[in-house]
Image (cartoon, grey):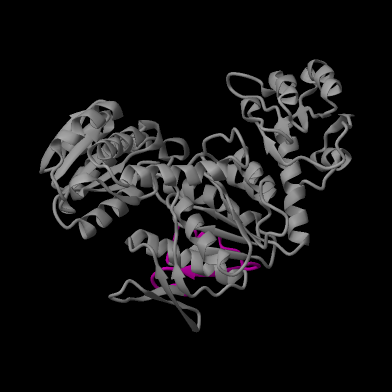
Amino acid sequence: MRGWAAPRIAAASGATLLAAGDAAAGPSAVAIDSRAIEGGELFVGLRGERTDGGQHAAAALRAGAWGALIAPAHADDAAAAAAEVGAVLLSHPDPLAALQGLAAAWRAELVADGARVIAITGSTGKTSTKDILAALLSTQVPTWATPANLNTEIGLPLAILAAPAGVRCLVLEMAMRGPGQIAELTAIADPDVGVILNVGPAHLELLGSLEAIAAAKAELIAGLAPGRTAVLPAREPLLAPHVRSDLHTVTFGEDGEVTLQEVLPDGRVRIRRGAETVELAPSFEEAHNLRNLLAAVAAAGAVGVTPHGELRVVFSAGRGGRLELAGGVVLIDDCYNANPMSMAAALEDLARRAPARSVAVLGDMLELGPSGGELHRQLGVRAGASGVDLLIAVGPLAALTADTFAGESHRVGDAAAAAELLPALLHDGDTVLVKASRGVGLEVVVERLCADTEADTAGPTAGVAVAEQDARADEAAALVPGAPRGRR
């Protein structure tokens, strides 16, 4: 949007231009946190649960913002600052709606210049699939993908607005918590390709049934314009009622149009996509990510890209990255979120890849409603059947998992207690899975283990790897300062 001057920003967002400012060029970025202003941004003052960002518009302008877009109630306070520094001032009764309108307009300009938009949703695996697809596409075309977790009604517009001019593929992640939210995001993104990875028991507390979850995810299908492409899991009866005859539907997985033919001893994979065979050498081997790879290959095909060769993916922090710690301990950092489906996949991977003792630090899976207790008990049985040797259960629901786990287990009340307990229980060569819903905050366990490794070694450590991974995520998020946390 650097080329969009103040009148065009006003028209695209539906805002009233109160002050045109001195700058001829447009903003360098969009920010929603006045404390993150570095210079040149359009500050959008959003109303939150605790505060109204419009109250901080004057501070943002004095800190160097290109301009501010705020509700009329804050216009008088911001006007003096705008006049003082020669900044742009825009007013809209609903700044969030203005932000979304601006994003939709920027998306339209990117598409007019040749970009294609791919939107991804599902109960689990959205971020990992986004990372995989972005890596696939970027080897052949300029690609932009959702930074960090910008996947909500606030985050998605910020992700679109951060996309640079000249991008040819825009990969967007969509999260939801209730009916209507995927529809809202789809209306903003207007995707050429919509990907639904799976339907699982996430948000049962809010939606009540798997059928309702499927219907909420299928809002992506409903929002696609005729003639566009839906990428769906094969043999998913919950999505069958939502399939549209006026869309091109591509299925992936067993019995799908895109299937995994073979995993070779050297880690290369052969994937059948229609009549062709795609051969890739991915930097990962987890079964659930190979399934995510199928969805990514299907989506890439829908925009005319046939990937091949080496595929190196840096997964977003907390999404299953493997880190080597002191004593040959391998840490699987999957602490960003969890539901029964993703827990099962993570335990399967732990069982398959642990060369010695396997340790699972499992926290509460939240938002499961009345079924939560039974689902946690089932998880304990599954962990035992997977061959987990040691279980640390974090939180009151996870304690039910420990109740049905046949091996050695320990129960702790919170993540801090788990971080204190775990180091003393580890043996050299252990493989440790750390996973829970985001609200449990198990990243403190990961941080503690990495910090212990840094203290025990003099050279490069896994702690450094974690820091580098987080820095990459932070660097991406910095394009849209102050971005809020996403939702599953």
Q: Quadrant of residue 223?
A: bottom right
Query: Does the magenta segment cover residue 247?
Result: yes
Tell which of 179 and 296 is nearer to you: 296
Instruction: Report the predominant secondary structure element of the magenta stretch.
Output: loop
Q: Is residue 198 above or below residue 486?
A: below
In the rendering, at what x and y percent does residue 50 appear? 58, 19
User: What residue do we see at 59% from left, 40% from top?
Assistant: 478
Tell which of 185 and 41 is nearer to you: 41
Q: Is residue 388 above or below residue 255?
A: above
Tell which of 271 and 190 is nearer to you: 271
Query: Does the magenta segment cover residue 95?
Result: no
Tell which of 74 and 371 is nearer to you: 74
In the rendering, at what x and y percent does residue 395 appear? 27, 29
In the rendering, at what x and y percent does residue 222 appear? 62, 55
Left or right: 464 with respect to 276?
left
Please indicate, yes or no, whether residue 30 appears anywhere in the rendered image. Answer: yes
Give, as a single range, the part of the protein colored magenta.
Answer: 235-257
User: What residue do we see at 82% from left, 24% from top?
Assistant: 85
Please indicate, yes or no, whether residue 233 appears anywhere in the rendered image. Answer: no
Q: Quadrant of residue 171?
A: bottom right
Q: How many callouts does the rendering have?
A: 0
Q: Quadrant of residue 48?
A: top right
Q: Is residue 254 above or below residue 414?
A: below
User: What residue do we see at 48% from left, 60% from top?
Assistant: 132
Q: Which residue in the rendered view is the most extreme toward the bottom? A: 275
